[in-house]
Every structure is written in structure tokens, then in C-alpha cells.
């Protein structure tokens, strides 16, 4: 091969390599943005921490935050239990904080507009006296895709 052809071949290969890398990058980015597993996992983590994080000083705001994440019959039942929960937290002057381990979620089911995510939650309850107690919960967060948002349609303890 003469020198001119070698340069043309090298240039062509370089252009093809750049195009291939750019295409791979775009496909990776789109897959990352459109990954429904990531969306339901994120929604379940948010719901779990919002559900468990309660402070007697901000109880109404805390309960409003959770209510905003609910839908269907779960929203109705949560609304019905809200007053009793607020009274218990306020009367005992509790502060409950939660933590989910980095690998503390697993998508159990995902299909179209329905999902179930298992979440490990470590909840620490601190009483007015300052004594704290940590409990380990395993919950199933049932999600429904409503108008572009994953909302909680059920929440149950599984372990």
C-alpha cells in the first residue's frame, strides 16, 4: 500500500472509532435515563424513608410528605390512620429516623405500571428522655405508575 492509502485508511478507522464510541455513549446514557428499575428503586427508597422519618415537632409536615407519595386505597387508609399516628408520635415526643443500606433494595416485580420493591429499613426511635432504640424492618413497597410518577399503592412488612 502506498502512503496516501495508509493515511486514508487510518483516518477512516479513526472516524469510525469516534462514531462508535459516541453511539455507545449515547445508548448508555439513554438506557440509564430510561431504566425503569432505577426509577422504581428510587421511588421505593424515598417512600420508605418518608414513611419512617417522623418527628413530633414536624409531624404534620412529615405526614403530608408521605400522603403526597400515595395513591388509591393505600392513600385512603393512610389518611384514616394519620390522626392516630400523629397523636402517638406527639404524645410520646418521638423522633424516628431511618436509614436504608446501599444495597438495601431489590425489585421483586416490575411490569408496565405496577412494581413491588423489597426494602431493608433500619429505623431509630428516640424518645424524649434521649434513649434510642433501633429496629430492622423489611418491607414491600407496592408502586403504581400514575401520570408519569411512581406512587405508593401499598406498603407491608415482610420480615
Image (spheres, rainbow, N blue to C red):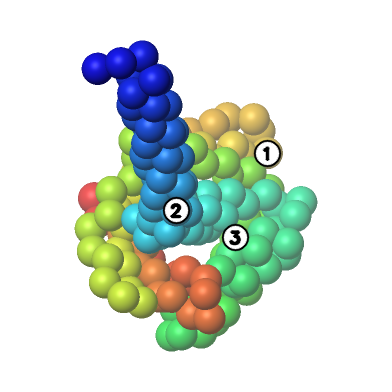
Quadrant of res 63 = bottom right
Q: Residue furthest top?
A: 3
Q: Which residue is mark 1?
A: 128
Regarding mark 2 in the picture, which secondary structure is present there?
helix
Q: Are marks 3 and 2 in contact (CB under 8 Å)?
A: no
Regarding mark 1 in the picture, which secondary structure is present there?
loop
Mark 1 Cα-neighbour bin, 10 Å: few <14, some 14–19, many ≥20:
few
Residue at left offset 67%, top offset 49%: 55
Q: Tell which circle, 3 or 1, labels the residue nearer the N-terminal end.
A: 3
Whole-percent x, y for residue 141 in the image: 36, 62
Q: Nearer the viewer, residue 119 or 27?
A: 27
Residue 113 in view (yes/no): yes
Residue at left offset 43%, top offset 85%: 73
Mark 3 or 2: the one toward you: 2
The residues bearing labels 3 and 2 have C-alpha atoms spaced at a distance of: 46 Å
Regarding mark 3 in the picture, which secondary structure is present there?
helix
Q: Which residue is mark 2?
A: 30
Mark 2 Cα-neighbour bin, 10 Å: few <14, some 14–19, many ≥20:
few
Mark 3 Cα-neighbour bin, 10 Å: few <14, some 14–19, many ≥20:
few
Amino acid at each position: 500500500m502506498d502512503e496516501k492509502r495508509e493515511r486514508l485508511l487510518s483516518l477512516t478507522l479513526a472516524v469510525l472509532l469516534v462514531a462508535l464510541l459516541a453511539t455507545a455513549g449515547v445508548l448508555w446514557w439513554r438506557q440509564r435515563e430510561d431504566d425503569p428499575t432505577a426509577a422504581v428503586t428510587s421511588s421505593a427508597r424515598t417512600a420508605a424513608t418518608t414513611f419512617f422519618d417522623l418527628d413530633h415537632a414536624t409531624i404534620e409536615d412529615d405526614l403530608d410528605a408521605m400522603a403526597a407519595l400515595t395513591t388509591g386505597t393505600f392513600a385512603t387508609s393512610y389518611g384514616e390512620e394519620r390522626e392516630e399516628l400523629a397523636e402517638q408520635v406527639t404524645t410520646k415526643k418521638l423522633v424516628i429516623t431511618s436509614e436504608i443500606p446501599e444495597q438495601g433494595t431489590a425489585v421483586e416485580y416490575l411490569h408496565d405500571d405496577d412494581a413491588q420493591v423489597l426494602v431493608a429499613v433500619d429505623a431509630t426511635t428516640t424518645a424524649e428522655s434521649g434513649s434510642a432504640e433501633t429496629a430492622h424492618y423489611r418491607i414491600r413497597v407496592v408502586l403504581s405508575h400514575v401520570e408519569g410518577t411512581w406512587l405508593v399503592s401499598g406498603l407491608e412488612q415482610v420480615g
